[in-house]
Image (cartoon, rainbow, N blue to C red):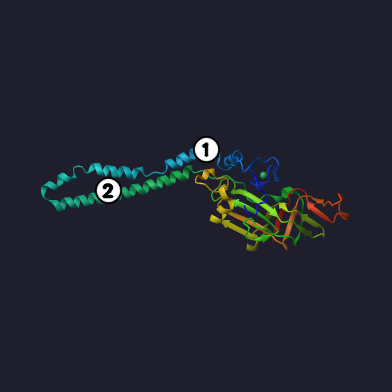
């Protein structure tokens, strides 16, 4: 993950937030968390997404059994055996009539074979659909109001970081990786990072958002310049082995698309939750606390 903050991340099994190793979930510290880079943790993520190993194995077997094709084969075989007496009909010299009958039999048989093949395929597809597991994700958009009060202002310049894919420059980004056909919620992974910047609040105070992990959302539909969407090969490349592999039930992040919200200098943002005075280098606070920082992981909403 090019823009990822955490080189060896963990994943919250409830809200699917990417966290640092050993870091509790900032949405709710009671959320269970599993590391993505060891076998045991990965298995816990797979169980949260697809269900326990027994359910996955059963789904594998049932969808394999639904591969079908046996019906058409049976008819072909029956055709071969059933025509054992055909040759005797040719004894009367009415070769033309016999050939006509044979042609009709072959045509009907071919039609039956094709029909059986089509039915077999439809049944197999239906069985695959019926037994296929759907990944379980988290709902989109976290309710930022749970952080309580918020303050609004404008992002002023600072260094830039690459977006989640690394394709765009921004001050901060937040991404949701989503599944195509999911149950409960379709968000399989959410992550966010900030370059470190100042938000000049409407009341004149400055809030310093430090470089590191953040939660970023947008109010309403952000303009296309503030979004980044990826799917297909670009997404697979970004997620690497978290999304790949022959067996889909072994993929911890079976995402189909990802959408990021980008924050840049000049954008209006809400900083949610309590603010704390920014400590100065000498251990005290700045005079009159003109500069503040969010307490804990910054939660930011891009407004407009
Ligand atoms: Zn969580």
| Residue 302 in the figure: left or right of residue 79 | right
> What is the residue that sits farthest to the left in this orientation?
93
Residue drawn 45% across and 42% down? 63
Coordinates of residue 249 in the picture (x, y in percent): 52, 43
Front residue of this view, candidates 141 and 23: 23
> What is the residue that sits farthest to the top in this orientation?
54
1 or 2: mark nearer the eye: 1
Ligand 1 in which quarter: top right
Q: Earlier in the sequence, mark 1 or mark 2?
A: 1
List the residue tagged with mark 2: 109
List the residue tagged with mark 1: 55
Q: Residues within 10 Å of mark 2 (few under 14, many from 20)?
A: some
**Is the distance from the Cβ of mark 1 to the nearest ligand 1 atom less than 8 Å?**
no
Coordinates of residue 193 in the picture (x, y in percent): 69, 53
> What is the residue that sits farthest to the right in this orientation?
287
Coordinates of residue 156 in the picture (x, y in percent): 76, 62
Coordinates of residue 154 in the picture (x, y in percent): 75, 61
Residue drawn 35% across and 42% down? 70
| Residue 242 in the figure: left or right of residue 17 | left
Front residue of this view, candidates 194 and 144: 194
Give the secondary structure at mark 1.
Answer: helix
Give the secondary structure at mark 2.
Answer: helix
**From what the image shows, is residue 200 above or below residue 16?**
below
Residue drawn 37% across and 45% down? 69
Task: Please give the label number shown on residue 247.
Answer: none
Labels 1 & 2 near each other (Cβ < 8 A)? no
């Amino acid at each position: 993950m090019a823009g990822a903050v955490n080189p060896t991340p963990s994943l919250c099994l409830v809200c699917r937030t990417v966290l640092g190793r050993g870091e509790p979930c900032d949405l709710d510290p009671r959320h269970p968390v599993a590391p993505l880079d060891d076998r045991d943790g990965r298995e816990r993520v797979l169980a949260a997404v697809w269900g326990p190993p027994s359910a996955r194995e059963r789904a594998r077997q049932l969808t394999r059994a639904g591969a079908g094709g046996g019906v058409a084969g049976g008819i072909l075989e029956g055709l071969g055996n059933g025509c054992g007496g055909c040759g005797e009909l040719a004894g009367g010299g009415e070769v033309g009539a016999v050939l006509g009958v044979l042609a009709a039999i072959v045509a009907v048989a071919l039609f039956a074979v094709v029909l059986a093949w089509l039915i077999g395929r439809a049944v197999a597809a239906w069985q695959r659909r019926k037994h296929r597991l759907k990944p379980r994700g988290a709902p989109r958009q976290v309710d930022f109001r749970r952080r309580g009060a918020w303050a609004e202002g404008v992002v002023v310049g600072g260094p830039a970081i690459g977006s989640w894919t690394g394709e765009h420059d921004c001050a901060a980004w937040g991404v949701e990786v989503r599944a195509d056909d999911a149950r409960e919620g379709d968000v399989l992974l959410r992550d966010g990072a900030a370059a470190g910047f100042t938000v000049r609040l409407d009341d004149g105070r400055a809030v310093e958002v430090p470089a590191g992990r953040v939660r970023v959302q947008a109010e309403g539909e952000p303009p296309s310049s503030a979004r980044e969407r990826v799917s297909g090969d670009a997404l697979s490349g970004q997620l690497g082995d978290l999304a790949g592999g022959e067996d889909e039930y072994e993929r911890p992040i079976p995402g189909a698309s990802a959408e990021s919200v980008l924050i840049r200098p000049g954008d209006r943002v809400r900083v949610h939750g309590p603010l704390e005075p920014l400590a100065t280098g000498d251990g005290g606070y700045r005079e009159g606390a003109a500069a503040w920082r969010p307490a804990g992981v910054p939660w930011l909403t891009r407004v407009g």
